Image (cartoon, coloured by chain):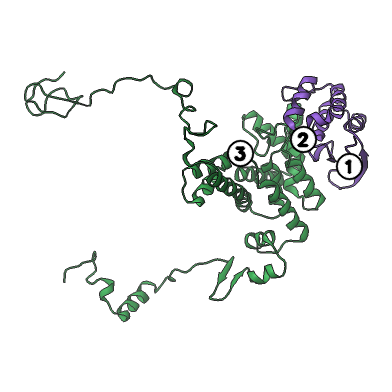
Chain colours: A purple, B green
């Protein structure tokens, strides 16, 4: 199963595209995020949101992350998984980056179970 | 002759046209008679003109709703990127599922009034917590004016705003949405779109600085809500604070109307029937006093009136110390 995620890193004020990538899974997307950004909460949040939303926009250090994800999963199921793994502690994102990887791998494995139906 | 009309000797209908005209000229010797005054539009028997443009000509030439909003609120037609931004913003803002506005529209619609009453009730919920566009604009404008007066950068002024609000334990308008705790899905996208379309100005930039300053102060990100994002963009598009709020509220009004229509077409009136499969909003089960009532327990109603044992007068107020008819002392 290939669910592409495209992402751009864009200068907040000058609109300049600094990086442009296409990934074939949430795990690949997470790995790029994790390598590119230090803040674990940011990395975990963006990974989680990319499993749910088609458009994911967030910012860090005067840079936009502007992503399009084809996952579009059903949040009640994904949230339960994230809480089980510990990516979400209640509604707060974990400060442990490894939780993001575990979550992304599980989502890729269990994609069909996490859809709306 | 006796006056029938206050101090006037004659009713106006008893005067001739000439007499009335003379009085009229006397009254309005120093003042203009009332007439509407607007620079927005006029109409005649055969056409409607807004800010100088025939409205039919406008739409025939391809201008749409967004263009007309710019025209009537700002007196100008927008550049394509500005109209695109407004369209994007209002399209995203229009629907928000069950919020105070939609819920109110539905509850009012359940009573089956004329439908305009239902969606008017929906938009009447906008104020200090739900869609507080006016309060947001006031704060943004106040601090931006201060920045200019005190020679501060947007970043410095955002830090001051955050510090002052946290110290006073006041909410910062435009930040946080109680349901979208991981960030309102529309808010960052709207701000980003404003940069992409080249319409982001000092309000949007200040909003971003507020988010950054708050993150620094609290050690964690508090996300903007749709008022923070959308209202900042509307202000950067040149709408006045009041106009910006009206546009946002009215965009949501379409959603309130859709919810009111659905309520009237799909749901039973009153929402209190015993016959529906789901216990409904106004069902008595939902109002079972054992789970919903925490007022005083049931008790007898005190007697309002007493009877005089001496003269038999009834309907005496219970607080009377003596009968007002015979003077008999009352308990």
As helix, strand or loop, the secondary structure at mark 1 comes to: strand
- On the image, numbered disc 3 is attached to which residue? B98
Q: Which residue is mark 2?
A: B212
Q: Is residue B54 visible?
A: no
Report the quarter where the N terminus of chain B lies.
Answer: bottom left
Mark closer to the observer (1, 3): 3
Chain letter of disc 3 in the image: B
Sequence order check: which comes first, mark 2 or mark 3? 3
Q: Going 78% across and 24% down the picture, which residue do you hit?
A: A81
* Camera-side residue of B221 and B297: B297
> Closer to us: mark 2 or mark 3?
3
Helix, strand or loop at label 2? It is: helix
Task: Tell me if mark 3 has few (under 14), some (14-19) or many (20+) residues whose alpha carbon lies within 10 angstroms of its own.
Answer: few
**Can you tell which mark lies on residue A8?**
1
Q: Position of residue A108 (x, y in %)?
A: 87, 29
Quadrant position of residue B151: top right
Q: Locate residue B139 relative to residue B202 in the image: left or right.
A: left
Horizontal and vertical percent for residue B68?
66, 62
Question: What number is the disc on residue B93?
Answer: none
Label 3, secondary structure: give it: loop
Q: CA distance from mark 2 to mark 3?
A: 30 Å
């Amino acid at each position: 199963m290939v669910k592409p995620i495209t992402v751009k890193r864009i200068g907040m004020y000058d609109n300049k595209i600094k990086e442009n990538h296409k990934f074939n899974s949430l795990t690949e997307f997470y790995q790029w995020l994790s390598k590119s950004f230090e803040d674990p909460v940011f990395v975990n949040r963006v990974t989680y949101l990319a499993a749910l939303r088609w458009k994911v926009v967030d910012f860090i250090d005067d840079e936009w992350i502007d992503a399009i994800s084809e996952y579009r999963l059903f949040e009640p199921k994904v949230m339960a998984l994230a809480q089980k793994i510990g990516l979400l502690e209640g509604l707060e994102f974990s400060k442990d980056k490894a939780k993001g990887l575990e979550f992304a791998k599980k989502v890729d494995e269990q994609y069909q179970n996490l859809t709306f139906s | 002759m006796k006056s029938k009309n206050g101090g006037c000797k004659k009713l106006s209908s008893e005067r001739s046209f000439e007499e009335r005209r003379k009085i009229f000229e006397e009254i309005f010797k120093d003042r203009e008679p009332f007439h509407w005054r607007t620079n927005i539009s006029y109409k005649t028997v055969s056409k409607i003109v807004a800010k100088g443009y025939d409205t039919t000509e406008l739409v025939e030439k391809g201008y749409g709703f967004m263009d007309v909003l710019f025209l009537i609120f700002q007196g100008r037609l927008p550049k394509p990127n500005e109209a695109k931004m407004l369209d994007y913003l209002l399209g995203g803002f229009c629907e928000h599922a069950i919020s105070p506005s939609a819920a109110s529209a539905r509850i009012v619609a359940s009573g089956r009034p004329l439908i305009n009453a239902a969606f008017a009730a929906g938009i009447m919920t906008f104020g200090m917590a739900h869609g507080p566009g006016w309060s947001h604009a006031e704060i943004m404008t106040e601090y931006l004016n201060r920045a200019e007066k005190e020679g501060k950068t947007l970043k410095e002024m955002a830090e001051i705003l955050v510090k002052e609000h946290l110290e006073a334990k006041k909410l910062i308008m435009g930040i946080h949405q109680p349901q979208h705790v991981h960030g309102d899905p529309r808010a960052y996208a709207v701000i980003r779109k404003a940069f992409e379309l080249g319409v982001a100005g000092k309000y949007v930039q200040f909003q971003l600085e507020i988010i950054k300053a708050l993150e620094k102060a609290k050690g964690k990100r508090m996300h903007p809500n749709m008022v923070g994002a959308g209202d900042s963009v509307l202000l950067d598009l040149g709408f006045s604070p009041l106009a910006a709020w009206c546009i946002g509220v009215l965009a949501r009004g379409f959603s309130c109307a859709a919810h009111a229509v659905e309520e009237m077409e799909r749901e039973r009136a009153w929402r209190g029937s015993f016959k529906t499969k789901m216990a409904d909003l106004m069902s008595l089960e939902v109002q079972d006093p054992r789970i919903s009532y925490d007022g005083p327990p049931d008790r007898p109603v005190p007697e309002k009136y007493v009877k005089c044992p001496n003269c038999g007068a009834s309907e005496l107020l219970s607080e009377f110390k003596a009968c007002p008819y015979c003077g008999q002392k009352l308990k």
